[in-house]
């Protein structure tokens, strides 16, 4: 298995982190649109990326006007099993911070239908959406991911079978500790990405980050280790608090 190129950058705080991520998103969008006429990105949920999305949409910042939004296609790395207007919806978070303020054509916004009563059906519908967009190979230009304190990423949680999923592109695992289903892209998609950027903020993530980057490979216990782009790169953008247990001199 080819080793992806891995880079780690430690930023001072949450604002520096969001700004560095906005520059990476914008640069990659410019390059992809210039090279192939479109940019495809899978967005992470949770709280950490909110500031990034707000920066991308802010007319006073040097990002929004550099991006040809009509050539941008947005997907979600995972979604909660809730309707799009629910407070926990990852779609809602992105709508409020980015979509309502950047001119992305509605047809370019590929959300998970978390309102679908049957989570497995929501996953199957989303896989159809990805297959009609990508054809045979789901190669995102950029996948944004977060990291939980338990080293989960997207909705790949410890000791769940989806960590080893290499056929289906989307799955609907039951997450026992949350008492709910989640709809998530699988390693079958993450492994084909051109670039994966992990955004990690806060000291509560320090242990998980150290485990992902320096512990022995054990994706069942450390799910973020299951993200392994074959012909792509991984960039870790982390703040100083999250990096505090890392031997950053050694890096990885
Ligand atoms: C989700 C995410 C999840 C998230 C991590 C980190 O739907 O919750 O996709 O994987 O990235 O839980 O979440 P925070 O950024 O809120 O710490």
Image (spheres, rainbow, N blue to C red):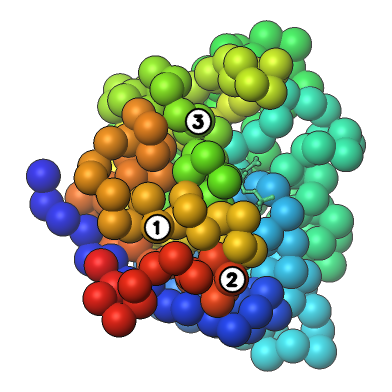
Query: In the visual, does 250 lie left or right of 86?
Result: left
Q: Position of residue 76 (x, y in %)?
A: 59, 44
Name the quadrant containing residue 247.
Answer: bottom left
Residue 224 visible here:
yes
- Point out the tag, 2 or 3, that comes first from the N-terminus: 3
- Please report contact status of discs 2 and 1: CB closer than 8 Å, yes or no: no
> x, y (%) of residue 204?
62, 55
- The residue drawn where x is 22% and y is 58% is 4
Which quadrant, please, contains the C terminus? bottom left
Q: Residues within 10 Å of mark 2 (few under 14, many from 20)?
A: some
The quarter in which the N terminus is drawn is top left
Taking 248 as reference, is 45 left or right? Answer: right
- Name the mark nearer the viewer: 1 or 3: 1
Tell me which residue sits at (33%, 44%) in the image.
Answer: 225
**N-term-proximal mark, 1 vs 3:** 3
Query: Is the CB–ligand 1 distance for label 3 below 8 Å?
Result: no
* Residue identified by numbered label 2: 241
Check the image and report above or below for 69 versus 145.
below
Q: Residues under labels 2 and 3: Cα distance?
A: 23 Å
Q: Which residue is mark 1?
A: 210
The answer to whether 124 appears left or right of 65 in the picture is left
Residue at left 68%, top 23%? 178
Q: Nearer the viewer, residue 248 or 190?
A: 248
Residue 176's quadrant in the figure?
A: top right
Q: Which residue position is annotated with label 3?
A: 157
Point out the frontmost of discs 2 and 3: 2
Whole-percent x, y for residue 215 in the image: 28, 49
- Helix, strand or loop status at disc 1: helix
Instruction: Provide residue 219's location: percent of width, then percent of height.
Output: 32, 35
Residue under the image location 24 percent in, 42 percent down: 217
Instruction: Determine if the C-beta at disc 2 is less than 8 A from ligand 1.
Output: no
For the residues marked 2 and 1, what is the alpha-carbon distance in whole angstroms?
A: 12 Å
């Amino acid at each position: 298995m080819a080793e992806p190129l891995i880079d780690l950058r430690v930023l001072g705080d949450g604002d520096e982190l969001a700004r560095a991520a906005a520059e990476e998103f914008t640069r990659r969008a410019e390059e992809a649109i210039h090279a192939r006429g479109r940019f495809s990105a899978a967005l992470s949920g949770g709280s950490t990326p909110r500031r990034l999305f707000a920066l991308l949409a802010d007319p006073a910042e040097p990002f929004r006007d550099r991006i040809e939004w009509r050539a941008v296609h947005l997907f979600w790395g995972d979604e909660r099993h809730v309707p799009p207007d629910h407070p926990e919806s990852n779609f809602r978070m992105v709508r409020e911070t980015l979509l309502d303020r950047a001119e992305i054509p509605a047809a370019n916004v590929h959300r998970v239908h978390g309102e679908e009563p049957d989570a497995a059906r929501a996953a199957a519908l989303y896989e159809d959406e990805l297959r009609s967009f990508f054809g045979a190979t789901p190669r995102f230009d950029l996948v944004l991911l977060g990291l939980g304190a338990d080293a989960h990423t997207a909705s790949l949680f410890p000791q769940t079978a989806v960590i080893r999923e290499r056929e289906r592109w989307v799955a609907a695992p039951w997450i026992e500790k949350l008492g709910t289903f989640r709809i998530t892209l699988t390693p079958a998609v993450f492994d084909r990405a051109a670039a994966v950027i992990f955004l990690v903020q806060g000291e509560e993530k320090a242990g998980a980050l150290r485990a992902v980057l320096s512990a022995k490979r054990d994706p069942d216990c450390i799910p973020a280790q299951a993200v392994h782009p074959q012909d792509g790169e991984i960039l870790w953008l982390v703040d100083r608090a999250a990096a505090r247990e890392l031997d950053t001199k050694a890096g990885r």
